[in-house]
Image: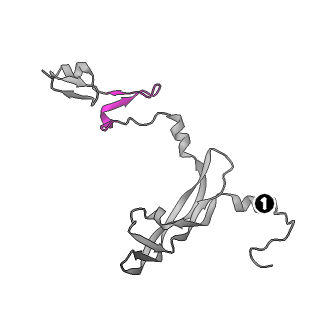
Amino acid sequence: MAEGEQKTHQVVKFMDVYQRSYCRPIETLVDIFQEYPDEIEYIFKPSCVPLMRCGGCCNDEGLECVPTEEYNITMQIMRIRIHKVQHIGEMSFLQHSKCECRPKKERARQENPCGPCSERRKHLFVQDPQTCKCSCKNTDSRCKARQLELNERTCRCDKPRR
């Protein structure tokens, strides 16, 4: 039987299904632009490359299949600049050599459901974990002690307006 052909009514054994679907490095076609998003002036041939990446299932919804060991591989890719030259050059890509089921990053975020303070100078703000409200670390009394007043928008002590 040639590769890719299947017998009709063939039943794949549980252990085969389990071993082939569990978290492991598996060849995955990855779009080059996904790896090199800033190289928009080129067309690549081929446009995607076969890389070993973690894939498969973990036996718990709270876990995800992630790489624990990685290495770089260099491949020859044709880079074409529209209406200009084309050349074969070397490009480096990340491959996964070992994978494990680890707790999802979302779980860690759920423990602290608040997003970060969106203000520009985050170090001047403190966040209430109950309400998620961001407020100033500086206090009005601390600013007044220096003959300044608290600007609640920037959380800085500014000179009083006259």
Question: Based on the displayed image, in which of its 4 quarters is residue 123 positioned?
Answer: top left
Question: Based on the displayed image, in which of its 4 quarters is residue 38 positioned?
Answer: bottom left
Residue found at x 74% / y 76%: 3
**Outermost residue to the left:** 162
Q: Position of residue 110 (x, y in %)?
A: 54, 36
Residue 45, placed above or below residue 55: below
Name the quarter where the C terminus is drawn: top left
Q: Position of residue 143 (x, y in %)?
A: 21, 23
Q: Nearer the viewer, residue 88 or 62?
A: 88
Q: Position of residue 18 (x, y in %)?
A: 74, 58
**Outermost residue to the right:** 9
Residue found at x 77% / y 63%: 16
Residue found at x 53% / y 35%: 111
Q: Nearer the viewer, residue 84 or 92?
A: 84
Residue 15, placed above or below residue 76: above
Residue found at x 59% / y 50%: 102
Name the quarter where the N terminus is drawn: bottom right
Asked whether residue 78 is drawn in magenta, I would say no
Region of the chain picked out in magenta, as a range: 119-136
Mark 1, residues whose alpha carbon is within 10 Å: few (<14), some, or many (≥20)? few
84 horizontally vs 99: left or right: left
5 horizontally vs 75: left or right: right
Asked whether residue 120 is drawn in magenta, I would say yes
Residue 152, placed above or below residue 83: above
* Amino acid residing under circle 1: Met
92 horizontally vs 104: left or right: left
Residue tagged 1: 15
99 horizontally vs 39: left or right: right
Q: Position of residue 152 (x, y in %)?
A: 28, 25
Question: Based on the displayed image, in which of its 4 quarters is residue 15 positioned?
Answer: bottom right
